[in-house]
C-alpha cells in the first residue's frame, strides 16, 4: 500500500480533535478497510498511547457500515466488524432465487420487475442485528463523534444525498449543486439505502423516497468532511490505483459481459476524491504563500472570515489488484453456498479474463470469508507496513503543503 498524503497545519490531537475519517464504498472489498481499522485501533493505538478516534466520520455504502463502528469510539466494536468480515458468508448477505429452468426464468422476470437481481433479506437481518445503535447514539450525543455523514443517491432526481447526524447547531456543509443535506438521526435504514447497489440490490426507502448506493454520486465523501471542520483526514479506499489511472491494452483483454460489468462498477464507484485532494493542496499552497508574504494574520483572517483553512490528508488504499485476488480464490476455494448462488458466482467470475488474473465483477459480490478474510488481513498488514507514516500523521502533520508519495 502506497499512501498519498497532503500536508497542512500542525495539530495536537489531544487538545483539539478535528480529526476526520472517510471510508469509501466497494461492497465486499470493504473488508480491506476493516483490516486497516483493526491495526490502527489495536497495535498502533498502543504505540501512540491513545486511540486516534475521529470526531468527524463520513462513509458511503460499505464504508458507512464500517464507519459506524468507528463512530462508537470503542475498540470492541472495531474488533466486532473485523470479525464479521473474517466470518461472513454469501448466505449472510444475499440469496438468489432459482432452481430448475422454469423457476429460474420466473425469478429473473421478478427481478426485472423489482429492479434487483438479488434478494438482500439476509443483509437486512445482519445489519439490524449488528448495528451498534446505543453505542453510536451515546458517542454522537456526547459530542465524542461530532459529525457522522452517510452518502446515498436519491433515485427520483439523481441527487447525491448526505444524511448528517450531529449535535452541532451551526454546522453548514455548504453542499455543491446536485447535493442535498438531511440533518437527522441515522439508523439502520440509512445504511441499507446507501448499500443498495443498483441492479443487484433493490432500492431502499427512507423518508418516503427511494435511495440507491451512494457510490453512484459520491463514493468517497471527502468534501463534506472538510466542510464539517476536519483539519486532518484519513481516507481509506477499497479500490486500487490502477482503477483510477487505467492500464492494459486491447490485446490483454476479452470484453466479456462479466468483464464489462466489473469495469462499469469500477467506473461508477470512482469519484472526485482525487480532484478534491488536488483542490485541497491548492488551497494549502495559497495559504502558505500568504503567510510568507503577509504573516500569520493572513491565514487567520481567511479562516475567520471565509472559513478556509489548511487541511492535511492521508489516503490509504490497496495496491494489489483485488479482482485478481478474487479470481484466484474463487478458482482454488469456491464458496460453500446454495447451488443457485454457485451458478450465479460462476457467471460473474470472468473465466476468460481470469486467465490473465482479473475478475473485478466478482470482487464486489464475493461476500465469503475465504475472500473477505484475506482482504481484512491484507488491510491490517498494509497498515502495519505504513506504521511510521500513520504514527506521524496522527501525532502531528507536516507543515509542507505538497503531497509527497511515501514509499
Image (tube, rainbow, N blue to C red):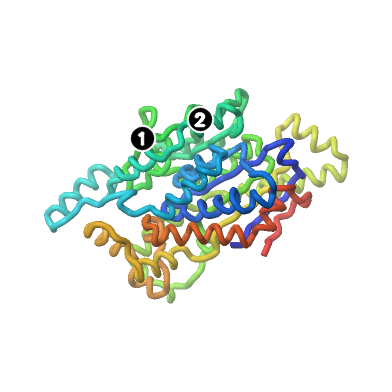
Residue 381 x %, y % = 56, 61
What residue would you read off at disc 1? 210
Q: Is residue 112 above or below residue 332?
A: above
Image quarter where the N terminus lies is: bottom right
Left or right, residue 372 beside residue 45? left
Do we see residue 257 in this rendering?
no
Q: Secondary structure at mark 2?
A: helix
Give whichever of discs 1 and 2 has the lower sequence position.
2
The mark closer to the camera, 1 or 2, is: 2
Q: Is residue 182 above or below residue 232?
A: above
Q: For residue 347, what is the image quadrant?
A: bottom left
Residue 40 x %, y % = 60, 51
Q: Is residue 340 above or below residue 228?
A: below
Residue 278 x %, y % = 65, 51
Residue 188 x %, y % = 41, 35
Q: How many marks?
A: 2
Residue toward you, 117 or 50: 50
Left or right, residue 156 beside residue 66? left
Q: Secondary structure at mark 1?
A: strand
**What's the CA distance linking mark 1 and mark 2?**
25 Å
User: Residue shown at 46%/54% (left/top)?
Assistant: 31
Residue furthest out toward the left: 102
What residue would you read off at disc 2? 137
Amino acid at each position: 500500500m502506497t499512501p498519498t498524503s497532503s500536508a497542512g497545519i500542525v495539530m495536537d490531537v489531544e487538545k483539539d480533535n478535528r480529526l476526520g475519517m472517510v471510508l469509501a464504498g466497494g461492497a465486499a472489498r470493504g473488508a480491506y478497510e476493516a483490516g486497516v481499522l483493526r491495526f490502527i485501533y489495536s497495535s498502533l493505538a498502543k504505540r501512540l498511547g491513545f486511540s486516534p478516534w475521529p470526531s468527524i466520520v463520513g462513509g458511503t455504502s460499505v464504508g458507512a457500515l464500517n464507519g459506524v463502528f468507528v463512530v462508537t469510539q470503542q475498540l470492541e466494536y472495531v474488533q466486532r466488524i473485523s470479525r464479521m468480515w473474517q466470518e461472513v458468508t454469501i448466505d449472510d448477505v444475499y440469496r438468489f432465487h432459482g432452481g430448475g429452468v422454469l423457476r429460474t426464468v420466473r425469478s429473473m422476470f421478478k427481478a426485472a420487475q423489482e429492479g434487483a437481481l438479488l434478494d438482500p433479506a439476509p443483509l437486512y437481518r445482519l445489519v439490524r442485528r449488528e448495528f451498534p445503535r446505543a453505542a453510536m447514539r451515546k458517542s454522537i450525543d456526547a459530542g465524542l463523534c461530532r459529525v457522522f455523514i452517510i452518502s446515498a443517491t436519491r433515485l427520483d432526481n439523481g441527487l447525491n444525498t448526505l444524511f448528517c447526524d450531529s449535535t452541532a447547531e451551526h454546522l453548514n456543509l455548504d453542499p455543491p449543486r446536485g447535493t442535498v443535506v438531511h440533518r437527522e438521526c441515522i439508523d439502520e435504514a440509512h445504511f441499507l439505502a446507501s448499500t443498495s447497489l443498483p441492479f443487484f440490490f433493490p432500492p431502499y426507502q427512507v423518508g418516503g423516497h427511494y435511495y440507491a448506493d451512494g457510490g453512484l454520486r459520491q463514493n468517497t465523501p471527502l468534501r463534506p468532511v472538510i466542510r464539517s471542520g476536519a483539519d486532518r483526514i484519513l481516507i481509506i479506499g477499497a479500490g486500487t490505483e490502477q482503477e483510477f489511472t487505467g492500464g492494459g491494452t486491447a490485446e490483454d483483454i476479452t470484453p466479456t459481459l462479466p468483464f464489462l460489468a466489473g469495469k462499469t462498477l469500477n467506473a461508477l464507484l470512482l469519484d472526485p476524491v482525487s480532484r478534491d485532494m488536488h483542490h485541497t493542496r491548492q488551497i494549502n499552497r495559497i495559504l502558505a504563500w500568504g503567510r510568507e508574504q503577509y504573516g500569520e494574520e493572513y491565514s487567520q483572517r481567511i479562516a475567520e472570515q471565509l472559513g478556509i483553512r489548511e487541511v492535511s490528508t492521508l489516503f490509504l488504499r490497496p495496491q494489489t489488484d483485488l479482482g485478481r485476488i478474487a479470481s484466484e480464490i474463487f478458482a482454488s476455494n469456491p464458496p460453500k453456498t446454495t447451488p443457485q448462488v454457485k451458478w450465479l458466482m460462476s457467471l460473474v467470475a470472468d473465466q476468460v479474463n481470469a486467465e490473465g488474473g482479473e475478475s473485478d465483477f466478482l470482487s464486489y459480490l464475493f461476500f465469503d470469508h475465504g475472500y473477505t478474510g484475506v482482504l481484512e488481513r491484507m488491510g491490517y498488514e498494509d497498515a502495519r507496513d505504513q506504521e511510521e507514516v500513520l504514527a506521524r500523521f496522527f501525532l502531528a502533520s507536516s507543515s509542507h503543503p505538497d503531497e509527497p508519495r511515501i514509499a
